[in-house]
């Protein structure tokens, strides 16, 4: 009887034609050494390069490799969610397709899980020489997030982690549309341990996390895990109320002492107050707007991603009729 455990590896990939074959080699070398059996679930997040073809080749040559194909680019967090949902293993490990989450850590992660941890988190320790915008923005982001949020998220945490069946089932049961998985994993609790690792260079290709995608992830994190922006509104309102009361008392004191003639008309101070109050109101309205937007998207109950059955080849563009296919 085969008593081997199943380890699932979940890998989102978006336009990773260059890095993917190299990463697969690295991963195979580690997995083949394990005494457990494994499955690798690649999630093709609507790639427009040769990622789909490479995955087809890998699935054909290795029955342990599976590929899910999205109907368009839904983003890293959606791709992770899809892969995690399909994983059948006793332990499931999620990692990037570009080699920045080194497969050689896998045996250590499994060992930690075997020693009784439900979740093995990893933490990036960047080389000192690396003073990139990414590093700075990530540090600032975690500082702010952990200040404003009730759920504490590990600074420098990566979406490179092992979850056992029980904790993964808990994560999968969270149905929200706006997904910041690092926060969600911390929210569900369980016993976790942190494994630090040095981030290697990308195997090939360029980062697929554009500034726009980073900003979207950050706002998903803040607005799904914090009510603080709304409370900022409340406290600003309270502050202005107190200021107004002070002003009333101040003006009344002139009237009571019969000194009302000395109340000078103050255009600039009035303007200043108007502008400040206007600005604060608008910022607060903005915060409320964002929350309403989030609520709106949640109540629509749209799925987080849509799969398509096969990575259909694009039909050749028909020059004669002038048809074109969108990117
Ligand atoms: N990725 C994805 N969908 C996206 C963007 C990225 O599936 O819309 C994948 C990408 O292929 C990689 C992982 O997410 O496997 C991390 O992305 P990347 O390495 O570009 O981010 P960085 O390491 O630069 O933060
Ligand atoms: Mg990367």
Image: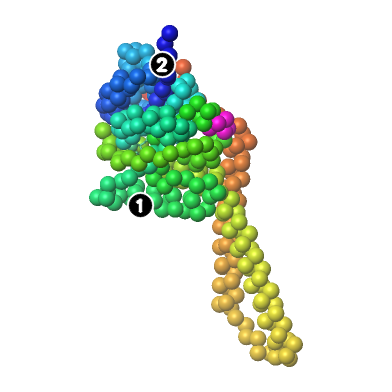
The C terminus appears in which quarter of the rendering? Answer: top left
Q: Is 171 one of the magenta-colored residues?
A: yes
Q: Which mark is residue 4?
A: 2
**Quarter holding the N terminus?**
top left
- Please indicate whether residue 64 sits to the left or right of residue 166 in the image: left
- Closest to the observer, 162 or 315: 162
Of labels 2 and 1, the one closer to you: 2
Indicate the secondary structure of the residue bearing disc 2. Answer: loop
Residue lying at 49% horizontally and 51% vertically, measured from the top left: 146
* Mark 2 C-beta closer than 8 Å to ligand 1: no
Q: Secondary structure at mark 1?
A: helix
Q: Is residue 83 left or right of residue 28?
A: right
Residue 149 or residue 276, whichever sits in front:
149
The magenta segment is 170-175
Q: Are marks 2 and 1 in contact (CB under 8 Å)?
A: no
In the rendered structure, does residue 282 fall within the stretch colored magenta?
no
Compare marks 2 and 1 and give the one earlier in the sequence.
Answer: 2
- At 33% from the left and 45% from the top, the residue drawn is 125
Residue 180 seen anywhere in this rendered image of the structure: no
- In this picture the colour scheme is rainbow
The image quadrant in which ligand 2 is located: top left
Q: Residue at x 38, y 42 (%)?
A: 123
**Mark 1 Cα-neighbour bin, 10 Å: few <14, some 14–19, many ≥20:** few
Q: Is mark 1 within 8 Å of ligand 1?
A: no
**Placement of 187 over or under 229, stated as above or below:** above
Q: CA distance from mark 2 to mark 1?
A: 43 Å
From the top left corner, tell me how far across and down residue 224 is, in percent.
55, 44
Question: Hey, which quadrant is residue 275 in on the image?
Answer: bottom right
Q: Toward the viewer: 17 or 21?
A: 21
Q: Which residue is mark 1?
A: 136
Q: x%, y% of residue 51?
A: 34, 24
């Amino acid at each position: 009887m085969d008593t081997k455990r199943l380890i699932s590896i979940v890998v989102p990939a978006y336009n990773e034609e260059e890095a993917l074959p190299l990463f697969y080699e690295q991963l195979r070398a580690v997995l083949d050494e394990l005494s457990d059996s494994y499955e690798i679930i690649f999630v093709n997040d609507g790639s427009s390069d040769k990622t789909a073809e490479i995955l087809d080749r890998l699935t054909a040559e290795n029955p342990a490799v599976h590929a899910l194909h999205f109907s368009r680019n839904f983003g890293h967090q959606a791709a992770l969610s899809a892969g995690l949902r399909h994983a059948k293993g006793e332990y499931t490990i999620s990692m990037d397709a570009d080699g920045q989450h080194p497969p050689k850590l896998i045996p250590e992660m499994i060992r930690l899980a075997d020693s009784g941890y439900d979740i093995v988190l990893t933490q990036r320790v960047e080389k000192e020489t690396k003073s990139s915008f990414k590093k700075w923005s990530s540090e600032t982001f975690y500082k702010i997030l952990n200040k404003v949020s009730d759920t504490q998220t590990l600074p420098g945490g990566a979406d490179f982690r092992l979850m056992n069946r029980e904790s993964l089932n808990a994560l999968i049961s969270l149905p929200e549309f706006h997904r910041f998985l690092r926060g969600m994993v911390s929210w569900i609790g369980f016993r976790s341990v942190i494994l630090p690792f040095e981030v290697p260079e990308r195997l090939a290709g360029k980062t697929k996390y554009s500034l726009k995608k980073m900003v979207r992830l950050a706002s998903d994190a803040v607005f799904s895990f914090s009510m603080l922006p709304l409370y900022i509104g409340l406290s600003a309102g309270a502050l202005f109320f107190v200021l107004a009361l002070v002003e009333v008392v101040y003006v009344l004191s002139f009237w009571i002492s019969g000194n009302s003639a000395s109340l000078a008309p103050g255009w600039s101070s009035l303007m200043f107050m108007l502008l400040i109050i206007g600005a604060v109101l608008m910022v607060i309205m903005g915060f409320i707007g964002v929350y309403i937007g989030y609520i709106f998207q949640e109540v629509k109950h749209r799925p987080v991603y849509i799969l398509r059955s096969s990575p259909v080849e694009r039909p050749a563009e028909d020059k004669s009729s002038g048809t074109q296919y969108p990117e």
